[in-house]
Amino acid sequence: MRLLKKTILSYFIFSAILLITAIPVFYYALKTMMVSNVDEDLVATKTRIMPLLQRVAESHADSNFNFPGYDIVFEKEAPAKNGDSIYGVELSGGSAEEVLPWRLLASHFVVRNESYSLQIRTSMVDKLSLIKRIVFVLAIVLVGLLLGLLIINQVLTKRIWKPFYSTLQRLRDYRVDKQPLLRLEQASVKEFSDLNRAIEQLTQRDYQAYTSQKEFAENASHEMQSPLAVFQSKLELLMQTKPLNEDQAGLITDLADASKRMSRLNKSLILLTKIDNNQFLEKETVSVKDVLLKLLQQYDFQIKQQSINVVFNDAADIAVEANKTLIEILLSNLLSNAIRHNAEGGTINILLKAKDLVMQNTGKLSPLDTQKLFQRFQKESPDTNSLGLGLEIVKKICTLNNYTIQYEFSNELHTFLVKF
Amino acid sequence: MKILIVEDEEELVKSIVSYLKAESYTCDVANNFNTAMEKTESFDYDCILLDISLPDGNGLQVLKELKANNKTDGVIIISARNSINDRVTGLNLGADDYLPKPFHLPELSARIAAVIRRRKFDGHSILTFNEISFDTSAKIITVNGKPVDLTRTEYDLLLYLVTNKNRVVSKNAIAERISGEDAEIFNNFDVIYAHIKNLKKKLAAAGSEDYIKAVYGMGYKFEI
């Protein structure tokens, strides 16, 4: 849910609850006030008319007595002792079904030892309808206020949040390898301009980290390769020294192999860093089939030497838009693994189908540990020629190009499935 | 033959000089950019080994100056930065070859020989060692005047050993020569053994002496 909606919804719920409760409360409060006011008036009226009434009662005139705004009825009755009481009654009005509210004061008075009952009543219709009108107007004002607030809030927040959304969009499009700095629009709201400044500083630091990492990759390459070059050249000079016996030659060979491994390891790590840094930017259409055919030819000797039977089902070709070097590395790592970890006289099945490349090979009779398979330096074989970086490189290349790679083991076949 | 080595890593320079001396090359050394510029302006070299990253400048600038002055020195870039960009830039600027560090000295020697052959003799050169002759443009060899039918790999291998004659060429160096980058993927020593065996067989059949010697499993040597 959007922040905007969330805040507005809270406001709305609060206002609605307030409105729903406030209007009846207000109505009853107003009504209570009105009733007590009317009651006071009734009592005051009684006091005012009592002298008049006594005179009228003495003269035995009509039991109806006119006083503006009040209906007054008195009649003889048996003496009663209870005092005044005020209460609301509903009496039928003009038409039969219409029932109208009245306020009634019942009292007694005594004239010449005769008891009279007295009723003073006043109609509440006008007063109640007045209250209703007041409440109605009030409700309209409140609802109007609420709607107005909502609309203003909506419009205002939209305008206020605009720089935020523009920043968000810019941030979404930002690629550290494409642009050194993110320049954001100035925002009038302090929080947003602070945010923008923080983001600008963040991208700046990111870019610096990115470039220094990139430089590190280059420097590491340079700094490592130079001593390796010295080491290797000295070994080769050592090979030329005379006299040289078999033991010494053996030691030199071991050193040469170690130096070769170091150099390979270094190259592979630099390759990984370069993939991480996305430094393979040139893209072209690469035919997976062609690359595989070329690799099969290159590895022909190894394949023949291990008497591996290669079944290449190349009914379809997969054309991918990617960096050719990376695709070559990807396929070469998969294929060389299939050869290296194969059994003598084993099989390699390669299947190209739609967007899938399936590579199966015989070899170890138990499945590989899928948890560790694509991790750095997870070696399956004690072979010193295996660095334990091949599948990590494969995984990195797949991730970079949004390919997926899966491994499964069934029917004694190790299967790698790449979905391009 | 005069070679200029532009390289700041002193120990590597020493190794290269020491290895190339045996080839009767005269080696000149420049440890930095300025010396390299001075030397290339004052003298002509048959081949220049050029490191790109120098303490006081970029080796590619030396190459640009050479080309601007229409110098015909052969240039091999030796760089620790094995990046495709550097390789392409270097070759586009007119370098003859690009050799990433670390390299094998026999490989360097073979590349220098190839550059010089190309520059000096337009590639048409006949190398003769006793009864064996190489026609480097046609890429064929003859023993006692009779052509020997060698595969491309066998020819390359033989020429490689011959360019480094009388010196041990390590198995790793040969493996890289034969399979290029693939030498890194498999232990190709069986391949080497197979190729050497065939090569020796063919040369012997053509009436050549057995010049190729294995040196304690360390490598091979063309002994003449």
Image (cartoon, coloured by chain):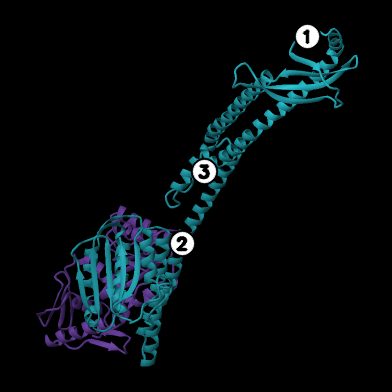
Chain colours: A cyan, B purple
**Residue B23 at least partly seen:** no
Q: Closer to the observer: label 3 or label 2?
A: 3
What subunit carries mark 1?
Answer: A
Q: Judge whether B53 appears above or below A173 on screen.
A: below
Would residue A368 be found to the left or right of residue A291 on screen? Answer: right
Q: Residue at x 74, y 24 (%)?
A: A35
- SS label for mark 3: loop
Amino acid on which disc 1 is placed:
Asp
Q: Judge whether A231 appears above or below A78 on screen.
A: below
Amino acid on which disc 2 is placed:
Pro
**Proximity of marks 3 and 2: CB atoms separated by less than 8 Å:** no
Would residue A43 be found to the left or right of residue A302 on screen? Answer: right
Amino acid on which disc 3 is placed:
Arg
Front-most of residues B148 and A307: A307
The answer to which image quadrant residue A294 occupies is bottom left
| Residue A2, numbered label | 3
Q: Residue at the front extreme?
A: A78
| Residue A62, numbered label | 1
The answer to which image quadrant residue B91 occupies is bottom left
Q: Judge whether B82 appears above or below A36 on screen.
A: below
Q: Residue at the right extreme?
A: A112
